[in-house]
Amino acid sequence: MAQFTVNARRFDPYKNFKFRVKWDGRYVAGISKVLALKRSTEVVEHREGGDPSTSRKSPGRSKYEPLTLERGVTHDIDFEQWANKIWNFGSGAGAEMSLADFRKDVILDVFNEAGQKVLSYQLYRCWVLSI
């Protein structure tokens, strides 16, 4: 991984990054925008034993929407290499990638204007849908 010459410990060299993505114990990307941290739960309607006129509602299965990360320019190419585990452009027949480790546990850290971490989301068994 290439390092910045001015400040080698800095992972977000651009002022507007408010999020950082971390996996395998290190930050790999600065993110400028996060969309759709959304969960929805189905409604299951049912009737109780001797009451045919009234239906009751209970929570059913939960569904999580895909998370969209808009990323700026970064010096780390790990994210793109991770995305290429699913599909590698230009690879011919027989050059398929192994899907053994295409899922990663990811931590999404949220920072305030002062650069202090205020919130972290742990996202389990993630994979890249598109880049």
Image (spheres, grey):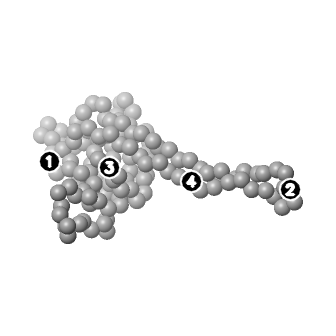
Task: Using the image as rendered, state which of residue 57 and residue 16 is in the foreground.
Answer: 57
Task: Judge whether 32 appears above or below 23 on screen.
Answer: above
Tell me whether circle 2 and circle 3 mark residues in contact (CB < 8 Å). no
Q: Which mark is residue 2?
A: 1
Extreme residue in the left direction: 5
Q: Residue at the location (59% across, 50% down)?
A: 41
Q: Residues within 10 Å of mark 1 (few under 14, many from 20)?
A: few
Q: Residue 7 at x, y = what percent?
A: 17, 39
Q: Amino acid at mark 4?
A: Ser
Q: Residues within 10 Å of mark 2 (few under 14, many from 20)?
A: few
Query: Mark 4 highlights which residue?
Result: 62
Quadrant housing residue 50: bottom right
Q: Could one spot residue 103 in this view of the protein?
A: yes
Q: Earlier in the sequence, mark 3 or mark 1?
A: 1
Mark 2 vs mark 4: give the one in front: 2
Where disc 1 sits, the SS reads: loop
Query: Mark 3 highlights which residue?
Result: 130
Q: Which mark is residue 51?
A: 2
Task: Using the image as rendered, state which of residue 74 and residue 117 is in the foreground.
Answer: 74
Q: Residue 87 at x, y = what percent?
A: 26, 58
Task: Using the image as rendered, state which of residue 27 and residue 131 is in the foreground.
Answer: 131
Tell me whether circle 2 and circle 4 mark residues in contact (CB < 8 Å). no
Q: Amino acid at mark 3?
A: Ser
Q: CA distance from mark 1 to mark 2?
A: 68 Å
Q: Residue at the location (27% across, 68% down)?
A: 98
Q: Residue at the location (18% across, 61% down)?
A: 91
Quadrant housing residue 92: bottom left
Where disc 3 sits, the SS reads: loop
Tell me whether circle 3 and circle 1 mark residues in contact (CB < 8 Å). no
Where disc 4 sits, the SS reads: strand
